Amino acid sequence: MSGKNWIGLFFLLFGLGFLLQQTDVLDFSSVLFMWWPLILIIIGVIQLVNRSHSSVVSGLLFILIGGLFLMNQWVDDNLVAYLWPLILIFIGLTFIFSQVKREKPSHSNQSIQAFSLFSGTEVRSRSKKFEGGSATAIFGGSEIDLRDAIISDAGATLDLSTIFGGITIYVPRNVQVEVTGIPIFGGWENKTREHVVDNEELPILRVNCLTVFGGVEINN
């Protein structure tokens, strides 16, 4: 499922829940108060699906915290008191077993998919016929490096969504960038330099932005 679909599903479920509460069909506030730790667990599962190193670490941490709060409602002991020691132990083990230096994952696919939730992602494309893709950053950030990619003659389209997050894109110099979108307490900035050559039609990279308390930056 793409990042936009996750965002849409989140707002849809909460909107339906509060709508049912207003019509006295369901006490959504009580359900949310009881089962809110499941939100953390679901976030963790989404992070694990991404399978990048940073998302796996944060995913396991969210599952740990959510599971602890959930079990705390079913037992007499105060399990939340163990939360900070467990987090410190988890962070320590992460530093010990993590690699010192990791390169950006690169691929030659014609499209990219990036999703970051309370974490960061880095993607580098070396595609010989790049056609576009999508990236979503929610309380996190993404860096997309297309400087080694060749944009398709028919052009490419990137759909970007940020909610309290940011996305940075690096594009080749011989590309014409067109940016459109919907800013909601957010925005975007196109810092690319125009590459003008007489009698040459440059491939077009279309960037569609949805920024909610977030931003998108495009550089060469």
Image (tube, rainbow, N blue to C red):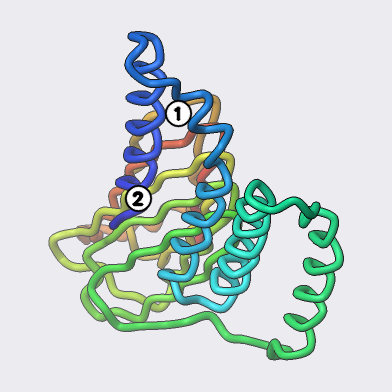
Position above or below: 42 against 174: above
1 or 2: mark nearer the eye: 1
Residue at position x 23%, y 73% from top? Answer: 110
Foreground residue among 200 and 105:
105
Residue at position x 22%, y 61% from top? Answer: 200
Position above or below: 123 against 184: below
Alpha carbon separation for disc pair 1 and 2: 18 Å
For label 2, the residue is 177
Where is residue 16 shown, x and y percent of the image? 33, 24
User: Are dots 1 and 2 in contact, CB under 8 Å?
Assistant: no
Could you tell me if residue 168 is visible in this image? no
Position above or below: 190 against 203: above
Around disc 1, counting alpha carbons within 10 Å, would you say few (fewer than 14), some (14 to 19), or many (20 or more)? some
Earlier residue among tags 1 and 2 = 2
Where is residue 84 shown, x and y percent of the image? 84, 60
Residue at position x 60%, y 55% from top? Answer: 118
Farthest residue, direction front: 76
Foreground residue among 150 and 66:
66
- Report the quarter where the N terminus lies: bottom left
Around disc 2, counting alpha carbons within 10 Å, would you say few (fewer than 14), some (14 to 19), or many (20 or more)? many
Question: Which amino acid, mark 1?
Answer: Pro
Could you tell me if residue 112 is visible in this image? yes
Which SS class for mark 1? strand
Question: Which amino acid, mark 2?
Answer: Val
For label 1, the residue is 183
Where is residue 122 shown, x and y percent of the image? 52, 70
